[in-house]
Image (cartoon, rainbow, N blue to C red):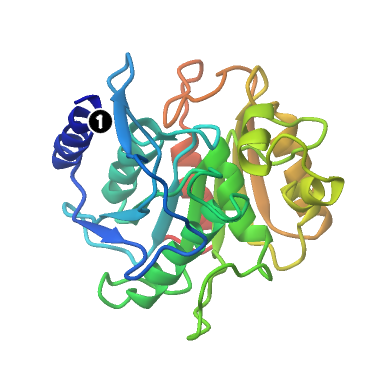
Amino acid sequence: MKALFSSLFLVVTFSFVAQDKVVTLYLQKVPNSKTAVDYKETAETAEDKSVRIKKVSNPELLVFCPKKVTPNGVAVLICPGGGYRLLSMTNEGYTVAEKLNEKGITAFVLKYRLPDDEIMIDKKIGPLQDAQQAMKWIRENATKYHLDENKVGIMGFSAGGHLASTVGTHLDQIEIENATKTNLRPDFMVLVYPVISFGKYQHKGSKQNLLGEKPSEAVVAQYSNELQITKETPITFLVHAADDKAVPFQNSVDFYMKLHQEGIRSEMHLYQAGGHGFGLNNKTIKDSWFDSMLHWLETNQLLK
């Protein structure tokens, strides 16, 4: 009965979300998957009324199109966070998509599979597969949504920031079928209090959920994304708070420093306070990282 209620709640929840379309990422069998008995997707509401989703086995893409303003051709794939344990769909998904829409940007919220040995052959690559498939779908449907194929970015929060930065740094690690050789590289990245490293400044929960309890040093290095930056890594906008007790701010600092060393144009906003998980609104400051991000896009000729 509880599972049934959760499923019904999930449907009701999505009915109040102003997305224009829900896209099933894989038309055939989900890659890297195995059948699990009684594995049901669930949704729950936190004290702040935000929706959190767990146990995703059928990944989807929620499409949000600008309505009050003319689309400007820019697209952003949004990866909500949640420690690779859940997805913070409202605070780091829906509200962000609607804010992007106000500026003429078409947004795509990714409901990606959370790494789980119960439903995945190799849980390390499950979220990356879904993000790559989403990038592929967005570019292949660019004309339909009036998008510029050279202005498709990715945005991630917390563990979603790790996923987004993995897409941007693992350009040679293609984990999906891509016979058309569609470009899977984001044109820019926006990483908000992101998990980046699984080394000294790791977020233990994200690391364990993605890599398992005892990953090899090689695997830890492979998914510590500050170590994977090359000259092909997309330009990046970073946001973090120095008092973040969940994901140390050094994750963003180290990533920024490596970007700078490679000569990649990037910008970082490190606030003295704000904690973790503030989404669009760091209540300790009067300015807005979102507005600064728009200015950064303009500076880099991605937004008029």
Amino acid beneath label 1: Ala
Q: How many marks?
A: 1
Q: Is residue 53 above or below residue 191?
A: above
Residue at position x 17%, y 54% from top? 67
Q: Is residue 269 above or below residue 67?
A: above
Point 61% across, 36% down: residue: 209
Q: Nearer the viewer, residue 195 or 119?
A: 119
Q: Please give left or right for residue 272 compared with residue 277 in the image.
A: right
Indicate left or right for 46 with 159 as reference.
Answer: left
Judge left or right: residue 69 versus residue 159.
left
Q: In the image, residue 147 lies at what x, y percent?
A: 34, 70
Q: Secondary structure at mark 1?
A: helix
> Which quadrant would residue 86 be assigned to in this image?
top left
Report the side of 87 relative to 50 (left or right).
right
Q: Position of residue 205 (x, y in %)?
A: 63, 28
Residue hosting label 1? 3
